[in-house]
Image (tube, rainbow, N blue to C red):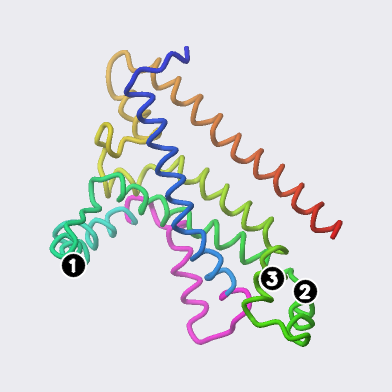
Amino acid sequence: MFDLSPEEYMAMMLSLKVSFFSVAIILVPGIAVGWLLARCDFVGKSLLDGILHLPLVLPPVVTGYLLLLMLGRQGVVGRWLYEHFDLTLAFSWRGAVLATALMSFPLMVRSIRLSIAVVEVKLEQVARSLGASAWNTFFTITLPLISPGIITGSILAFARSLGEFGATITFVGNIEGETRTLPLAIYSYIQIPDGNEPAQRLLIISVVLALSALLISNFIERKTTRWLEAQ
């Protein structure tokens, strides 16, 4: 049942690679934007919040098509990247990372924002009154307190990246060995005769990976919360 073919194994490893890189590139921006939305009031905050959450409510195909228009080789940004850096994002695994990062970014920001919102501001004010700089206060007070939210957001973003389909297939296509992640591989197998067995294998692997990510998230969050309470 789980004797994977080279193509199936490649799809699984590519999905893990894309998901890891996706989380890595949105982690720091996710913390920054989450802090901005939780702590700052400014003109256009609601608009920024709405734009941030658009990938969650728009059809993923729309998001993928917008990426293709902007970052395709004939797009304004895509053409500039190709001409100056010889970099092509469309129809490459790097583009898959970008598409999954865009789709999972709102989940990370939302989790981090909620964690920052419940941090007692007076703790930070005490640290500042004792001479700590803004950066020291953030890294020694705020960051440890919001670490459960960061961990939860990161793993949720990872799980979301594993399951991304619409934006990915629209922006980078379904190229075996390059952009064919687990969801795209399952879709490909169910389109051909005798493809049910490999599709079912990859289906089970997808469920196991996503469920494992969620269970690990819950476990780490509980451990981190207990550690913070003990301090």
- Determine the secondary structure under disc 2: loop
Badge 2: few (under 14), some or many (20 or more) residues near its Cα, within 10 Å? few
Q: Residue at x 55, y 62 (%)?
A: 109
In the image, what residue occupies the spot 47% across and 15% down?
2
Q: Which mark is residue 165?
A: none
Q: Position of residue 155 (x, y in %)?
A: 57, 47
Q: Amino acid at mark 2?
A: Glu
Relative to 200, residue 41 above or below? below
Q: Is residue 192 above or below residue 56?
A: above
Earlier along the polypeptide chain: callout 1 or callout 2? 1
| Total marks in image | 3
Of 61 and 109, the residue lying toward us: 109
CA gap, disc 1 and disc 2? 45 Å
Query: Could you say where residue 61 lies in the image, as x and y percent from the top left?
Result: 33, 50
- Is the residue under label 2 in contact with that under label 1 (CB below 8 Å)? no
Q: Residues within 10 Å of mark 3 (few under 14, many from 20)?
A: some
Q: Name the secondary structure under disc 1.
A: helix
The C terminus sits in image quarter? bottom right
Q: Main secondary structure of the magenta part?
A: helix
Residue type, numbered disc 1: Val
> Which residue was labeled with disc 1?
76
Q: Amino acid at mark 3?
A: Ala
Q: Residue furthest front?
A: 131
Q: Which residue is mark 2?
A: 120
Q: Residue at label 3?
A: 117
Q: Residue 37: give x, y in percent of width and height.
A: 57, 74
Q: CA distance from mark 1 to mark 3?
A: 38 Å
Q: Nearer the viewer, residue 126 or 136?
A: 136
Alpha carbons under labels 3 and 2: distance apart = 8 Å
Residue 118 shown left or right of residue 184 in the figure: right
Q: Residue at x 27, y 20 (%)?
A: 192
Q: Which residues are magenta?
A: 36-62
